[in-house]
Image: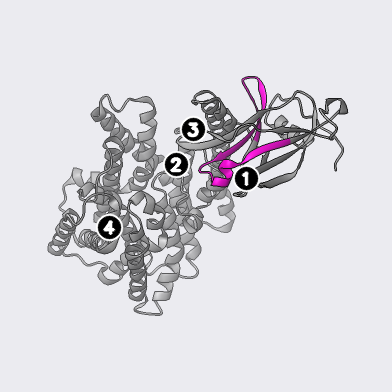
Amino acid sequence: MRIASLDYLRGLMALGIMCYHYLVWSYGVYGSETFLGKIGIYGVSVFYVLSGLTLYLVYQDKLTLKTIKNFSVKRVARIYPLLWFCILLNILLLAKSYSYEKILLNITGLFGFFAVDQYIPTGAWSIGNELVFYALFPIILITSRKFKYLIHFLFLITFCGALYFAFFPLEEFNSLGKAWSTYINPLNQLFLFVGGILIGNLFVFKQNNKLGLFLIFLAIAIFLLPLSEGDLIHIIRGPNRIIYAAGCFILTGGFLFTKFPDFKRINVALERLGHISYSLYLIHPIVYWFLAKYFNRAENIYSFLSLAIIITLVLSYAVYVYFEKRFIGYGRKFTTSTISTTSKLYFKPLLIIILTVILTLQLNKRNMLLKAKEKQEIMMLNTGTEYSKILAQRSIYRDSTYKIFIAKIDGKKELIFLKKGALTDMQRQSKFFVHLYPMYKKDLLGKANHNPINFEANFTSFEYDSDLYYVAHTQLPNYVIEKLNLGQYSYRGDNSINYKIEKLVLGTEIAKILSENKESINIFEYIEETF
């Protein structure tokens, strides 16, 4: 069953979150003292309360051990297709690229269970939370039929969990950005979902317009309270977290109790806004940032925002009608079809899903290659020092102190010792040497079986991309090298030498890596022998 007033609330929250994001991305952060800043954070909290409430209203008498499968199929059909579609849009339209592990976590929805901050579409962290809640819902509802006050008890337990987060882990951070991974933990949000179930359990089918309107105005007053200022961290921790969460419960209860007057066009608009809320929530960031790639926001921000809002609303409605509803329909058909017809029903959506996944992976691979190429070009061409070029090369040898590279710089073959970040006193005083073992004896410079190269200078430094690097380097000879030995030494306080000598490196190993990296340095050759 659908309750129109709850659809209104869902749509208004999605619209509020869109407005919050668009204005923040255009003008800067809205502080914790602003009404819009609170809606931007607690609009999602209202989603959780609504989710628990509406699931309870729909399934309170329907969900049993035998119908869990039907419940799961409908939830999958409702949530996953649009999530997959938005992952594809992020990669296709915004040219984003992600690790295959992250894509797998998002396609399966497992990021909500194991890595909630690894979401791809903006805002999808809340979808990960919802998936966790959906997994718990059948257990809560079925068990509550045997234990009368189970839902009350669960709310108390989860509320205590929220108190723990509000007064301990979140108190350690000074900004929402730094606290984000902790804040979006499902255990910090679960009390909102369980609270929604509890509201349904206590007040199902009760209407009282006067009480409902009073609660709505009370909730608005709570969100207008100037309890803090500055960073939004202040409204998600301490007593403020409890006060504004209470505002979410009160607001939801108010809309549940209220039957709004029949203003036909307004009611239809609000109802449709509620229907498209999921599309609106996930698609609006994609629309904004796609338009930002092609339009200069600074020239006329009002026109840009107007265009973004119109396109977002139209596109969200189209996606809901032609995409979401179709998959929702598939979910219903699967739950009502016989075994003989179910296999036919599976074919079309399964084919769409497979093709979407393949396209997503291929586009992601393309974006990764393009970004790697772009990054290398920037590193090689747009830095202030020639030694920054080594950052685009592949390391051939490393230990805890330094990385060693072989690269061409101004046409010269150089061996480079690189250290990122601060140096200890010993590392700063360190000098390096290399023992080169020529392939042919004619290239030996003395009686020993190797040619030593000592670095004349200690580390010099340069900055790249706001990071500090230390580098020591020397030019390599032109003869063929069979193997080499890398060493590091530093002086102790008594002027004795402290050696750090590493194992020999085969020239064939270096040649292989340079070949893979398409480096045209021919002083290393493949050889068969080992030692």
Q: Residue 61 in magenta?
A: no
Q: Is residue 340 left or right of residue 515?
A: left
Q: Amino acid at mark 2?
A: Cys
Q: Which residues are magenta?
A: 405-434
Residue under numbered circle 4: 3
Q: Earlier in the sequence, mark 2 or mark 4?
A: 4
Q: Earlier in the sequence, mark 2 or mark 1?
A: 2
Q: Does residue 93 lie above or below 498 as drawn?
A: above
Q: Amino acid at mark 3?
A: Tyr
Q: Amino acid at mark 4?
A: Ile
Q: Earlier in the sequence, mark 3 or mark 2?
A: 2
Callout 4 environment at 10 Å: few (<14), some (14 to 19), or many (20+)?
A: some
Residue under numbered circle 3: 464
SS category of the residue bearing label 3:
strand
Residue 131 appears in the picture as rendered:
yes
State the mark number for residue 86: 2
Q: Amino acid at mark 1?
A: Tyr
| Front position among marks 2 and 1 | 1
SS category of the residue bearing label 2:
helix
Residue under numbered circle 1: 491
Q: CA distance from mark 4 to mark 1?
A: 79 Å
